[in-house]
């Protein structure tokens, strides 16, 4: 039973696999799981999030049909995207209070990187909002999150359709690189505007003897994808092999 | 009285976890559970005597590979030598750090020279303590730690030193008054920290690994033991706060904050193990901050 689950993997989260971890893979370990009140709350939370990302998906489709092109669709889903992605910060709280058996550190890292992209890049640098790369990661995230939150919902209710499990551990193969590409291209597109405006940057001299160059920081963030992305991607592949073959074996014995 | 042999297996894997061969017939399940956890849980100490272990006549010892190890002394020396050296590179404005016109120039602010002295003496103190004062419980730590620790110490040292020794450095807002006060805090806390290290050393004879409750001595700096379990950490945080006020440098304040967080975690752990080990541990003591934390 995969209680409202586990984390690991996916920096920036382009992935369809989303978070995977010990809680599910170790099928032989009996997990205590959250109490009935916590479970009810988590079911509601996950249902709301699934609905939220469905709203974003539908919004994208409708905007595309109305406009006749896939450019600049960001504006049509900007508000729900910000609302529901930022709402995911609650997941850090869930881990911290123990109703979800995942690492606080790992969850924080994942959620914060998404929130960073939404607010500190896309929202802050208006000029990138019309870039196609934004659509790339928004689509990747949307599909990923719809599957991930429904996965958690079904798991909590102890009724997980194989299709959802399959989708979660398979679609990431395409969605993860897609999302990462979208994210990197967006950050890259933002660079000249950040430099020009001196966005979020402080220079010397000042009385706190501190300086920060947001432009350089963004470049460092982009570089950090190089070690992090392969690790997470191959971790997911490994998890996929473990979890999907495990289910296959169980089916054989039925 | 006939003794029982009790075999405990893992319910799922059927693997043999423990074999107790001299169990009293009167023993309750609770007592058996206790014997079992004692033989599983924490690792055995080098000093433990086989006969005294609760394992009957057949002892099963579980081996756990801790991975590549490195001595504490080596790690400490490396992680402390770095900041000492690195800070000086910035202080002397070695080429390629600041603009070329500043190469090998000297700051015109007194506080910058003072800060270099304080920072350098602090790390010299740490190196000397590592060589001559500290008595370590464990000989080694995982090898991975040296990379982690050095990144932390060396990285922060470079970051702080860059700003303090920068040609565009701005001296403290309240001038000499602020610097004097900060220096006093720094010196007092350094003396305090050193006093605690000496007191802890004296608790333990050379070559031994015994643990005793530390108490205040004649040295007034050690009276902080009345209120906290780890006054060495309290004084260390105090020193860095002093240094932050002295230099009025945000990176120093951040370094102090991170250090404080880590030391609080250590202090809480130490405090907890004192409480577990000693029944008569003084109840007034907090881990690191008197009355608060």
Image (cartoon, coloured by chain):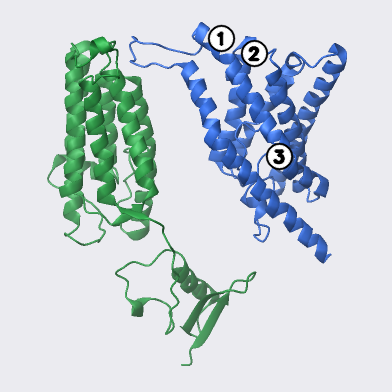
The reply to whether dot 1 and dot 2 touch (C-beta < 8 Å) is yes
On the same chain: label 3 and label 2? yes
Disc 3 and disc 2 in contact, CB within 8 angstroms: no
Is A202 placed above or below B282 here?
above
Chain letter matching colour blue: A
Viewport quadrant of the C terminus of chain A:
bottom right
How many other residues sit within 10 Å of disc 3, few (<14), some (14-19) or many (≥20)?
A: some
Give the residue drawn at x 68%, y 58%. A27
- Residue found at x 55% / y 80%: B7
Disc 3 to disc 2, how far (Cα)? 26 Å
Element type where label 3 sits in the image:
helix
Mark sitting earlier along the chain (1/2): 2
- Residue drawn at point x = 68 percent, y = 35 percent: A176
Q: Nearer the viewer, residue B233 or B286?
A: B233
Above or below for B289 versus A130 = below
To which chain does the residue with label 3 belong?
A
Q: Residues within 10 Å of mark 2 (few under 14, many from 20)?
A: many
Where B15 sits versus B224, above or below?
Answer: below
Image disc number at residue A173: 3
Where disc 2 sits, the SS reads helix
Label 1: how many Cα within 10 Å (few below 14, some 14–19, many 20+): some
Q: Which residue is mark 2?
A: A128
- Residue with the most extreme bottom position: B1
Chain appearing in green on the rendered image: B
User: B165 or B1: nearer the eye?
Assistant: B165
Q: Which mark is residue A193?
A: 1
Percent across and percent down for residue A133 are 68, 20
């Amino acid at each position: 039973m995969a209680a409202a689950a586990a984390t690991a993997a996916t920096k920036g989260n382009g992935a369809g696999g989303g978070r995977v971890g010990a809680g599910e893979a170790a099928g032989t370990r009996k997990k205590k799981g959250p109490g009935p009140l916590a479970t009810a709350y988590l079911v509601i939370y996950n249902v709301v999030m699934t609905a939220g990302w469905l709203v974003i998906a539908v919004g994208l489709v409708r905007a595309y049909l109305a406009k006749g092109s896939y450019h600049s669709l960001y504006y049509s889903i900007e508000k729900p995207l910000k609302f529901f992605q930022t709402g995911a910060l609650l997941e850090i709280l869930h881990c911290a209070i123990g109703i979800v058996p995942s690492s606080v550190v790992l969850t924080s890292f994942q959620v914060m990187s998404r929130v960073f992209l939404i607010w500190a890049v896309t929202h802050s640098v208006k000029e990138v909002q019309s870039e196609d790369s934004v659509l790339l990661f928004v689509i990747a995230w949307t599909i990923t999150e719809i599957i991930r939150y429904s996965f958690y919902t079904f798991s909590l209710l102890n009724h997980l359709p194989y299709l959802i499990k399959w989708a979660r551990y398979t679609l990431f193969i395409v969605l993860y690189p897609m999302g990462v590409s979208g994210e990197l291209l967006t950050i890259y597109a933002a660079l000249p505007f950040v430099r020009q405006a001196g966005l979020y940057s402080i220079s010397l001299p000042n009385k706190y003897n501190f300086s920060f160059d947001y432009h350089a920081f963004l470049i460092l963030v982009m570089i950090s994808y190089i070690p992090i992305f392969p690790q997470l991607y191959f971790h997911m592949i490994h998890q996929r092999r473990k979890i999907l073959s495990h289910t296959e074996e169980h089916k054989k014995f039925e | 009285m006939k003794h029982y042999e009790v075999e405990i297996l893992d319910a799922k894997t059927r693997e043999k976890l423990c074999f107790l061969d001299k169990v009293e017939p009167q023993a309750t399940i609770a007592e058996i559970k206790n014997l079992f956890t004692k033989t599983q849980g924490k690792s055995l100490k080098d000093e433990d005597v086989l006969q005294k272990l609760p394992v009957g006549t057949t002892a099963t010892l579980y081996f756990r590979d801790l991975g590549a190890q490195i001595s504490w002394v080596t790690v400490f020396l490396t992680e402390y030598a770095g900041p000492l050296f690195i800070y000086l590179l910035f202080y002397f404005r070695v080429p390629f750090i600041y603009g070329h016109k500043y190469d090998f120039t000297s700051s015109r602010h007194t506080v910058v020279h003072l800060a270099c002295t304080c920072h350098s003496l602090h790390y010299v103190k740490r190196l000397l303590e590592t060589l001559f004062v500290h008595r370590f419980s464990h000989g080694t730590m995982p090898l991975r730690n040296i990379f982690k620790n050095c990144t932390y110490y060396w990285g922060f040292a470079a970051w702080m030193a860059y700003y303090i020794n920068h040609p565009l450095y701005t001296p403290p807002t309240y001038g000499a008054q602020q610097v004097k006060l900060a220096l006093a805090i720094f010196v007092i806390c350094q003396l305090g920290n050193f006093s605690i290290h000496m007191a802890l050393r004296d608790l333990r004879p050379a070559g031994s690994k015994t643990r005793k409750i530390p108490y205040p001595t004649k040295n007034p700096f050690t009276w902080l033991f009345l209120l906290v379990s780890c006054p060495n950490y309290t004084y260390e945080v105090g020193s860095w706060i002093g240094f932050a006020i002295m230099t009025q440098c945000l990176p120093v304040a951040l370094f102090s904050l991170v250090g404080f967080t880590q030391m609080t975690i250590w202090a809480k752990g130490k405090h907890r193990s004192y409480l577990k080990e000693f029944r008569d541990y003084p109840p007034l003591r907090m881990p690191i901050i008197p009355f608060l934390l």
